[in-house]
Image (cartoon, coloured by chain):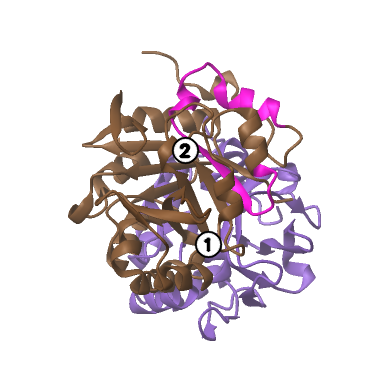
Amino acid sequence: MNAPARRLTIGVVDYGAGNLASVARAVTGLGHRCRVSRDTDTLAATDALVLPGVGAFPAAMAALHRHRLVEFLQRQARAGQPLVGICLGMQLLAETSSEHRVTAGLGLIPGHVHPLEEAGWHIGWNRLEVRQGDPLLGPSDGEALYFNHAYVFSTPAEYVVGVARLQKPFTAAVRRGRVIGLQFHPEKSQLGGQDLLRRVFDGLSGDATC
Amino acid sequence: MLTKRLMGVITVKEGWAVQSVGYRLHRPLGRPETLAENLDRWGVDEILVQCIDRGERGPDLALLSRLCRQGLSTPLVYAGGVRSVDDGVRAVQAGAERIAVDAWLHDSADTVEALAEPLGAQALVAVLPVSLAADGRVAWLDHRSRQSRPFSAEVMALLRSGHISEALLVDWQHEGIHGAFDHRLLDAWPVPELPLIGFGGLDEPEAIRKALSRDRVVAAAIGNALSHREHALQRLRAALTDLPLRPPQYAPLSTIAPWS
């Protein structure tokens, strides 16, 4: 693995949902430092935050509330600290979700999470189609990445930076400034995922216009 | 386009990876961590780790943690000893992306759906060792009693409920036998809405093509056959380019750690 241009400290938000260790291992595998924590001072001191997640939206939001992380994440994102949501972590960026019942999300990117229309779930490797020429995702256009979800994020087109397809396209990546959401698992998408994650960390933590 | 998948299967007994033949004979292969590292490097689409002797001991969280610390970049499906919601959640937290359940389905199928609440149906796989009965219907094996019987009404209801996303249909009688998978099982499967993963003697390109050509079959699970030949996985992919699979991939030398 090539050393990163700049060694970053990445904070992985530990709210008790999902596979934190895999994300942390992916971060250190890229040559960055990793802090897995729910302590807000520790997380605030990092170069970028990762919000991972496996499971259902209501349980994840309940855990974020329980650990008093909702306001913290909203505050940090609005202050410009880079935030990367992965899989369920991307969906948590939305305003609401209808999974199991209507639940409020972090509200960092306008839109709603609802069931996939074409299938009960979307499991496996699918190609990312990058939209709006996003500089961080652009080189991954056409890359096969690993998805595992049953709900999708509907958001205005201005926030959609990547889609995947069953028959119709659906949101695979969203972005609003330094907040980015990835529906797929880059940490489980082998070399293509590692390359994408490297660019996301380097780009979000560097030039604000990237 | 969503591709179909080639899954690598690691069967673990008493902490060691084994070659399983017919759910009866288990030949030691080595450390599961080594096999997982190889499958990850070769680029299988998912790795299934099934610990077949966990019983009442619960999931092997220590093994999952060791696998996770290796930095696998391939999705991990875990089976073995998951008998409660807490077991499933802990296995995900230890490093699995998805959970497969087997004995729990026999003992208390009506409670399995509770695992979909915290994890989501996309994370749940049913492991179903099956054979064809004399009447042509699918019979379901309880590996503990070694008795086969028809699916219960509770299990059928669960499989149709949407709380399970895929079924691993194991041709247990032909497991570990080269090219012996019985494709009739796929056609006799009684829940057409539930996507299938074929496993058990499914290792030859033609047999895999025959299975994956069926719309309802989304993946082929392959056991020790992937370790028998150099570039076995890439040879399979190269032979199956007519199917919606990821193409063969060869990791650049820069990503391979030097021998020490």
Q: Is residue A162 above or below residue B255?
A: below
Mark yes or no: residue B251 visible.
Answer: yes
Q: What element does badge 2 sit on?
A: loop
The reply to whether the magenta stretch includes residue B201 is no
Q: Residue furthest front?
A: B134
x, y percent for residue B233: 57, 27
Question: Which of the pair A152/A135 is nearer the observer?
Answer: A152
x, y percent for residue A64: 40, 74
Mark yes or no: residue A201 visible.
Answer: no
Question: Which of the pair B65/B244 is nearer the observer?
Answer: B244
Query: Nearer the viewer's eye, disc 2 or disc 1?
Result: 2
Specify the chain shown as purple: A
Q: Determine the image quadrant of residue B242.
A: top right
Specify the chain shown as brown: B
Residue numbers of the magenta segment: B212-240
Mark drawn on residue B165: 1
Question: Which of the pair A186/B79 is nearer the observer?
Answer: B79
Mark drawn on residue B200: 2
x, y percent for residue A186: 56, 48
Q: Is residue A10 left or right of residue B109?
A: right
Q: Is residue B15 above or below residue B111?
A: above
* Residue at the image position 43 percent from the left and 40 percent from the top: A28
